[in-house]
Amino acid sequence: MREELLAFVSRRGTLLEPDAIDFLLGQQDPIAPLRAFLEKCSEMPFVVTLHDVVDAGTIARQAAARARPLPVEAVVTAQVSVPASFRREGEPAGGRDADVRILRDITGRSTCEGTIEDFTRYFRHRFHVLRNLLLARRELAGAQDIAKARKSTREVRIIGMVADVRTTKNGHRILELEDESETVPVLVPSDSQLAAESVVMDEVVGVVGTANDRGLVIAQSLVRPDIPTARPFHGTKEHVRAAFMSDIHVGSRTFLEDKWSKVSAWLGGDDEVARSIRYLVVSGDVVDGIGVYPRQDEELAIDDIYGQYEALATMMAALPDRIAVVMSPGNHDAVRPAEPQPAFPTSIQKLFDSNITFAGNPCLLGIEGVRILSYHGRSMDDLVSAVPGLSYHRPIDAMKAMLRMRHLAPIYGGKTPIAPEAEDHLIVSEVPDLFATGHVHSVGVDAYRGVVLVNSSTWQAQTPYQKMRNIDPMPARLPIVDLATGQAIIREF
Ligand SMILES: [Fe+2]
Ligand SMILES: [Fe+2]
């Protein structure tokens, strides 16, 4: 019954307090009080407490006495309900002449329940979208289904999802490439130019090669969806600047209060660059959270999740009013861990003042017409371990790899939990003007084929956990981008 109960809450995107679990398991029908409570909630709570379910038990008993089945509509609504953001798609940020729009995120659109069918549909969507991007590549014009290509003895062009990557004892690599028709092994010879090219599980690639009579395709070239041609930066008319932050980790003992005071004072001061900053994009891990890793409580200065967000809200309120903030969650924040993550629930949003726009992770933003893709960057953990040469110190390289694959988190089943939504929100379906990430507590700015790249440091010193894993953070750096030209600088505090 415990499993059923936990599956029920996880399907609804909420959590149960341990005391509430014990109470419910003592009931004749453990799910009834919970369902009764969730039905009277206008939005899904972050956590359901003992008090909530005890109260709801009375309602459930009354409902049972009336012996009426639950209206189907009510059940469906509860399953798809997720926390709503104060401002949604297309609505400008309030009060001032700031121009912030959330063009795309998952908030309010989650439908998945984690069934096998959901996963099938999710991967099918991923494959179709990325295949269409690949079909637009000249090298893959006339690409065939794998089943058809296998019978060919001439040059073949195929597109598939990588189902396996292995290395033979002679150093050749074999990719299992899969489409809806069939799977085929693709040989990447160890002495070819392609040998240095990394391929990761579950990415969608095109292959030009020759099929042999044993059903093997010998690769001559690998084609990625990529950003096919460099584009000029599509900027604002006036020199308005945006600053980028992530991984503030408020509530941690290692949060750098003195560095924060410095950056906050600088932003509110007379410096010419500071005064031109009108926007602040915050890409997740805004607080340290609770229960994110074992014995985290020993590392916390604030051990209450709402207390952490309250402290952050006070810090944000002290920033100058001209700065419009867009804030999205990361893996330490109080939303579901599976990506794509929705914006913070109203219970958290209401702690902040109206200068903040809340978005999901990832999210595509329009800031004065400049398209900014903000993604926390959890998948870098998986990319760094899968791709030789990538490292936590060079997040920009991982970001370029994501753009070449046109996917933010290609590897399924690693450290990045992925929710099988009907559409794959982690595909980079539209080329942004600027791509921002965080998570690795490093920093960097660069450009790739006209897209400005920003990795946005941290405001937390090295934690004992990072020390143990030899991770050397680069805290208290503020990347700043001129939205007219795309020119990026990093200011250290
Ligand atoms: Fe972080
Ligand atoms: Fe993170």
Image (cartoon, rainbow, N blue to C red):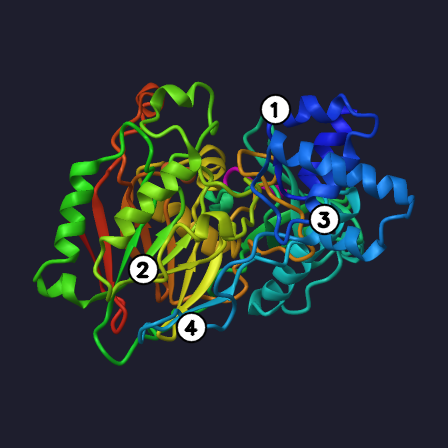
Residue named by callout 4 = 92
Alpha carbon distance from label 2 to label 4: 28 Å
Which residue occupies 66% across, 52% down? 421
Q: Earlier in the sequence, mark 4 or mark 1?
A: 1
Alpha carbon distance from label 3 to label 4: 31 Å
Q: Earlier in the sequence, mark 3 or mark 2?
A: 3
Which residue occupies 34% across, 30% down? 302
Q: Kindly indicate the quadrant of the structure image that contains residue 171.
A: top right
Amino acid on which disc 1 is placed: Pro
Q: In screen coordinates, is 96 left or right of 262?
A: right
Q: Residue 410 appears at what percent x and percent y?
A: 56, 46
Q: Which mark is residue 398?
A: none
Alpha carbon distance from label 3 to label 1: 21 Å
Q: Kindly indicate the quadrant of the structure image that contains residue 173.
A: top right
Residue named by callout 3 = 39
Please identify the residue farthest to the right as the structure is shown.
Answer: 67
Q: In screen coordinates, is 20 left or right of 361?
A: right
Which residue occupies 74% across, 42% down? 36
Report the magenta residues as a range. Answer: 187-191
In the rendered view of the protein, which quadrant contains the C terminus? top left
Alpha carbon distance from label 3 to label 2: 48 Å
Amino acid on which disc 4 is placed: Pro
Q: Ligand 2 is found in which quarter of the picture?
A: top left
| Camera-nearest label, 4 or 1 | 1
Q: Which mark is residue 18?
A: 1
Q: Secondary structure at mark 4?
A: loop
Q: Residue 182 appears at what percent x and percent y?
A: 79, 49
